Amino acid sequence: MAKIVKITRGEWFSIQRERARQKGYYFVEDLGYWSENDREVYLKYHQPLRILYIHGLSSSGSSATAESLRGFLPDDTILSPDLPVDPQEAVKMLRELVEREQVDIAIGTSMGAMFAQKLRGVKKILVNPSFHVSRSMRDKLGVNEFFSPRADGATHYEITEELCDRYEELERDQFDGLTDEEREITIGLFGVTDDVVNCAEEYKQHYTHFGKFFGGHRLTEAVINIVLLPKIEKFREEIQTLEIDPSGDKLFQIYMQRKQKSRS
C-alpha cells in the first residue's frame, strides 16, 4: 500500500535526494514550499511489486541484470527463472508463472523481450527486443555455452536447425491479436549503440510507447538505474492503491484536486 507521509526539512536534506527516490520518496510538487510546521509532503510507496525478468539467449535467471534489479529494488520480488531451451516450453512456463505468481510487470531483454511481449495482459518493458532470434541462432549452430550459471547445473546447450525452426514458427504470429489496451501497457526501450540486433522500426509498426537510451545491447547498472527504473516506477504508480495517512488526508485531497485540474 502507499501512504501520504510527511518528513521535516532537516530530514530531507540529511539524505541524498536520489537515494530517497530509490527508497520510494517522491515530493508532491503541486503543494510546494515549506508549511508552518516546517514539514513537506511526500508520497511513500509501500506496495511491493512482483516483477518477472526474462533473460536473453545463452543467459540464465542468475544473470547480472536480474541481480542488479534485486539490488535496486530490494522491497520488490524479482522472479527470474531459467528459460527452457525449447521455445514452446518456455512460453508455457512463463504463462503459468505469470498466473501463479500474479506478476505485475514483465521485463525482457533481447530474446527475453520476444517472450515477454507474448504475455498478453501484463504490463511489460521490452529492452532491445530480438523478435527474430531464430536468425541469429542459425549463425550459432552447434554446442553453445551459457553465460551465467543455471539452477540445473547445465553449462552448455545445443542449437540445431530443428530448434531454429521451432523458434521461427513461434515468431510468425507473435504480433497477432494486439489490442489498443495491450499497446498501452507495453514500453519498448532501444540502445542507440546496439550492434547486435535492431528491431526498433518493427516495434514501432505494432506498438506505441517507444524510447531510446545511450547504451548497447546489454544492460549496464547505469542504464538500469537511469532508464529502466523510472519506467518501472511509472507502472508502479498505475498499479498501486493508496492508503491515506490520516495526518496527510487533507493535503492528499488538495494534491488530487490539483492533479485532476492539470489533466483537464
Image: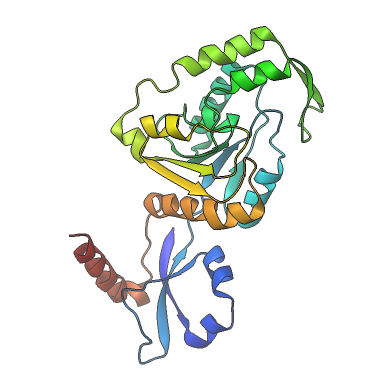
Q: Residue at x 79, y 34 (%)?
A: 149
Furthest residue in direction bottom, as rendered? 36
Residue 72 appears left or right of 41: right
Residue 107 percent location from the top left of the image: 54, 40
Residue 25 appears left or right of 79: left
Q: In which quarter of the image is the C terminus?
A: bottom left
Q: Residue at x 31, y 35 (%)?
A: 181
Residue 229 percent location from the top left of the image: 53, 54
In this rendering, does residue 215 appear at all?
yes
Q: Residue at x 51, y 32 (%)?
A: 98
Q: Quadrant of the N terminus?
A: bottom left
The residue nearer to you, when weighing 226 against 96, is 226
State which quadrant residue 155 falls in. top right
Residue 195 percent location from the top left of the image: 62, 37
Furthest residue in direction left, as rendered? 264
Tell me how many marks there are.
0
- Please tell me whether residue 142 is drawn above or below residue 115 in the rendered image: above
- Please tell me whether residue 164 is drawn above or below residue 48 in the rendered image: above
In this rendering, does residue 73 appear at all?
no
Residue 72 appears left or right of 122: right
Q: Which residue is drawn at 56% across and 63% down?
A: 22
